[in-house]
Amino acid sequence: DAGKDAGKDAANKDADKSPADSTCKGHTSKDKIGQPFEHPTQCTQYITCSEDGKPYVSNCPGGTYYDTKLSTCTIDAKASCGDRKI
């Protein structure tokens, strides 16, 4: 039934929306698209945003942590994790 399928599609679109969708707020201007920034809770991850505001979470290579001052993954001694989980 087409009506049922349309309802399922709408429900799936709502299910795809998550709090992470607001993660890119402030990171979608022309000079910030694709620029990494710290994950809010994980020091071994960072986020980049697409033009349409979709966040992409990436992992730092093993043994490194995302350094907010250098905007890259660095060894533990150089990382600025703050309250983010190591």
Image (cartoon, rainbow, N blue to C red):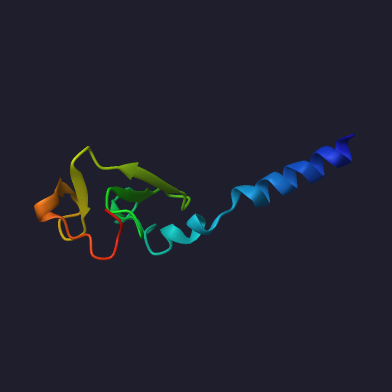
Residue 2: image quadrant is top right
The residue drawn where x is 46% and y is 53% is 53
Image spot of residue 10 (x, y percent): 74, 47
Image spot of residue 74 (x, y percent): 14, 47
Image spot of residue 69 (x, y percent): 16, 61
- Tally the marks: 0
| Residue 9 sits above or below residue 24 on the image | above
| Residue 52 sits above or below residue 40 on the image | above
| Residue 61 sits above or below residue 74 on the image | above
Q: Is residue 15 left or right of residue 44?
A: right
The residue drawn where x is 48% and y is 50% is 52
Q: Nearer the viewer, residue 73 or 43?
A: 43
Q: Nearer the viewer, residue 76 or 73?
A: 76
The residue drawn where x is 28% and y is 51% is 36
Q: Quadrant of the N terminus?
A: top right
Q: Nearer the viewer, residue 26 or 80?
A: 80
The residue drawn where x is 37% and y is 59% is 27
